[in-house]
Image (cartoon, rainbow, N blue to C red):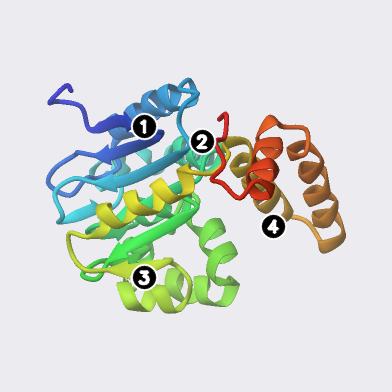
Amino acid sequence: MNSKEKVSLTIENQIAILMIQNPPVNILDADVVEELHFKIDIIEQTPTIKVVLITGDGGKAFMAGGDIKSFPEWMGKGVDVAKEKSQWLQHPLNRIEALPYPTICILNGVALGGGCELALACDIRIAEKHVTIGLPEIKLGLFPGAGGTQRLARLVGKAKAKEIIFTGESLAAEQALEIGLVNAVVPKWYGLTTGIQLAKKIATHSRQALAYAKQAIDEGSEQNLSEALLTEAHYFGHVFQTEDIKEGVAAFIEKREPRFLE
């Protein structure tokens, strides 16, 4: 591993682990954006992966936000310049959200601004009990621009998202759990272990079935119920053409564990 890289990637037993390593607080700067793209390229090109974990190094911060010191360069240059910066920040997070594999975010330290937005791009979030999470951008005279206004509202509801964004106040891990912002809260230092245990459980299943299930959920969530049910039926049709469903049903009938091909 290159000691200077700000995003590391390890792949083992069908599980990929992305770790943000940008001390002291793992900010989402230009290097991290670039390296996220590079590591996502590798993940997309590795056919053995079934689950992706994302976490931060150090325990102090998962990711404490964006590179605020670069913001003056974006000011007063016209709407299109700032719009392009927003889309530049959104892009790697959009790619993470679009991965066909389940993604699990391990919040092992503060997750503010861009850190919260990175977590929101994942399918499942596990927070250690000391973590605080939030979108404090309003305190700087701006608002979240890396997907926070959209993904938070879709996850916790529009009214609660507005309260969080309008006040800029952070939530404790247990508060985040209560509103569905995170899936679980675990003791300090147990986040990665818990995430790996969950990833291993998920990885026992068919890669194709996981991908089709994720697509059905994600696409259907943006549709009305009638359209969403058609989307579900569409992917249900596709999964019935795989070799893995043959193996899964055969294993059930023969009362044994399935040996999925993928």
Q: Residue at x 32, y 69 (%)?
A: 185
Q: Residue at x 25, y 66 (%)?
A: 131
User: What whole-number distance in Å separates the C-alpha atoms at marks 1 and 3?
Assistant: 26 Å
Q: Which of marks 2 and 3 is in front?
A: 2
Q: Mark 4 points at which residue?
A: 221
- The correct choice, above or below, for 33 with respect to 191 in the image is above
Q: In this view, does 217 lie to the left or right of 9?
A: right
Amino acid type at circle 4 is Ser
The answer to whether the residue labelled 1 contacts the one labelled 2, judged by CB atoms less than 8 Å apart, is: yes
The residue closer to the viewer here, 256 or 124, is 256
- The correct choice, above or below, for 49 with respect to 235 in the image is above
Q: Mark 1 points at which residue?
A: 36
Q: Residue 95 carries which label?
A: 2
Q: Which of marks 1 and 3 is in front?
A: 1
How many residues crowd mark 1 within 10 Å: few (<14), some (14–19), many (20+)?
Answer: many
- The answer, for residue 46, to whether it is visible in the render is yes
Q: In this view, does 136 lie to the left or right of 235?
A: left
Amino acid type at circle 3 is Gly
Closer to the chain start, of discs 1 and 3, is 1
The residue closer to the viewer here, 260 or 7, is 260
Looking at the rendered structure, the number of numbered marks drawn on it comes to: 4
The answer to whether the residue labelled 1 contacts the one labelled 3, judged by CB atoms less than 8 Å apart, is: no
Amino acid type at circle 2 is Arg
